[in-house]
Image: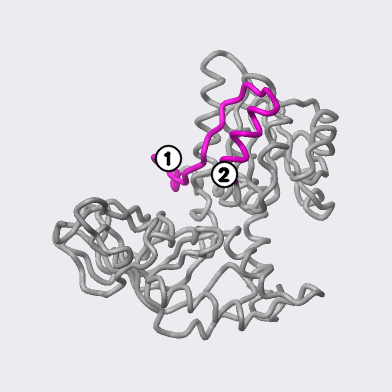
Amino acid sequence: MPLSSPFGVHRVLDPAADLAAVTLPQTARRLDASPRLAPDEVRIDVEVLNLDAASYRQLREKNSAPDGTVDGEAVRAEVLSIVAERGKMQNPVTGSGGMLIGTVAEVGPQSPLGLRVGDRVATLVSLSLTPLAISDGLERWDGTGERVPASGHAILFGRSIAAVLPEDIDPELSLMVMDVCGAPALVRRVVQGYAVSGRAPSVAVLGGAGKSGSLSLAAARDAGAGRVVAVVPFEAEAAMLRGTGLADEVVLADARAPLALEEAVRGAGGPVDVTVVCVDVPGAEQPAIMITAQGGTVVYFSMATSFSAAALGAEGLAADVTMLVGNGYTPGHADYALSLLRGNRAVRALFESRLAAESTAGHTGQA
C-alpha cells in the first residue's frame, strides 16, 4: 500500500486495505478526513455544500410529516451523522453525494491540479468520494434545501477535478450549474454524433425544467438537434418552459408512467432519436426506452436510475437502443455549461429563479 495515491486509496479506513484488494474512496464505508495532506493533495476550506437532487429528495421524504412538512432539524442531524460516520457526504440509501464550493487553503507540493492558495473553487467530483469534515454543526442551514452553508474542510486527490469560480457569475449560481455540468456536455456529444452523419436528431428530455434538464435542452439545440421535446410532470413547470425557445414542444407526463408517457411523446412527434433522463426519482428506466426510436440513444443522467432495470427493460421491450450512463465528466464540461448560462437568457432566468426560490425557502423555513 503506497503512502499516497492519486486515486485516494490511502484515505480509505473501512474496509481496511489488504494485499488481495484495495477499495476506492467511492465504495469505501469510511474515509480519513484529517487535514494533513499527502504531497499531491489539496485542502479546501468549505463554504457551501450542494447535495445532489436524488440524495436530498430521499432525506427530505424520510424526514417529512404526512402533510409534507419537512423536519429540517432531522435532515440536518442526518447529514451531520453521515459525514461524521463516513468522513464524506455519501447518502447510504442513494449512494450519491453532491459537490461543494470553497477556498483553497493548502496545496501539496506535488499536486497536479494547478490550484493556488486563495482560489475560490467548485469541486467537480462527488462528495461521495471526497474526504470531508464539518466544524460548525451546519448551524446556518435549516435542512429545507439542497444548498448547505457550511464550515469545515475537504480534501482533493491528485486525480480529482476542481474549477476556479468565474468572476462574472454569482458563486452559488456557478455551483448550481457545475453540479450538473456533465449533462449538457454529454448531450452535446451525442447529438453531434448524429450530426456527423447529416442527421438532426429529435430529442426528448425527461425533467426538462430542472437544472440538468434545462441545460440539456439548451445543449441539444446548440448541438444541432431537430425537434426538441421537454417532458415535465406539472403545469407550473410547463409554464416555466413555454415561450423560452428551449423546446419545440412541452408535454405534461409522469416519466414513471410508461403508457401515458409514450402517448404524450407520440403526440409531440415521437418516438425520438435521443432521450435524456434527468428526473430524480426511480422508475423512469423503461418508460424512457419506450419513447426512444429503434436504433436511438437513451442517456440516463440521474442518480436514481437502476441500470439493471434499464438493461432488462430494453431486453423485455425488444428495444435496439444504446444506453449511456451520464458519469458527470466530459472534458471541458464546466466551461461549456457556464457558456450556456452566459449565452442563453432562458437558461439563466430559470437558474436565477431557482436560486432565488431556494434562498427564500432557506430564510423562511419552507421546503
Identify the residue at image location x=66%, y=40%: 285
Identify the residue at image location x=72%, y=39%: 245
Q: Which residue is mark 2?
A: 301
214 vs 139, left or right, is: right
Residue 277 part of the magenta-drawn span? no
Magenta stretch in the rendered image: 306-335
Query: Type of residue at label 2?
Result: Phe
Asked whether disc 1 touches disc 2, contact meaning CB atoms under 8 Å apart, the reply is no
* Secondary-structure class at tag 2: loop
Work out how far the residue at label 1 is from the one at label 2, CA to CA, in angstroms.
Answer: 13 Å
* Residue 226: quarter of image: top right
Query: Type of residue at label 1?
Result: Thr
Identify the residue at image location x=84%, y=38%: 260
Q: Which residue is mark 1?
A: 330
197 vs 290, left or right, is: left
Identify the residue at image location x=50%, y=31%: 189
Residue 315 part of the magenta-drawn span? yes
Considering depth in this image, is 353 or 147 the residue closer to the camera?
Answer: 147
Give percent across and percent down for residue 146: 58, 67
Give percent across and percent down for residue 192: 53, 25
Tell me if mark 1 has few (under 14), some (14-19) or many (20+) residues whose alpha carbon lies within 10 angstroms of its own.
some
Considering depth in this image, is 326 or 13 the residue closer to the camera?
Answer: 13
144 vs 336, left or right, is: right
Report the quarter where the N terminus lies.
bottom left
For residue 342, above or below residue 356: above
* Secondary-structure class at tag 1: loop
160 vs 300, left or right, is: left
Report the quarter where the C terminus lies.
bottom right
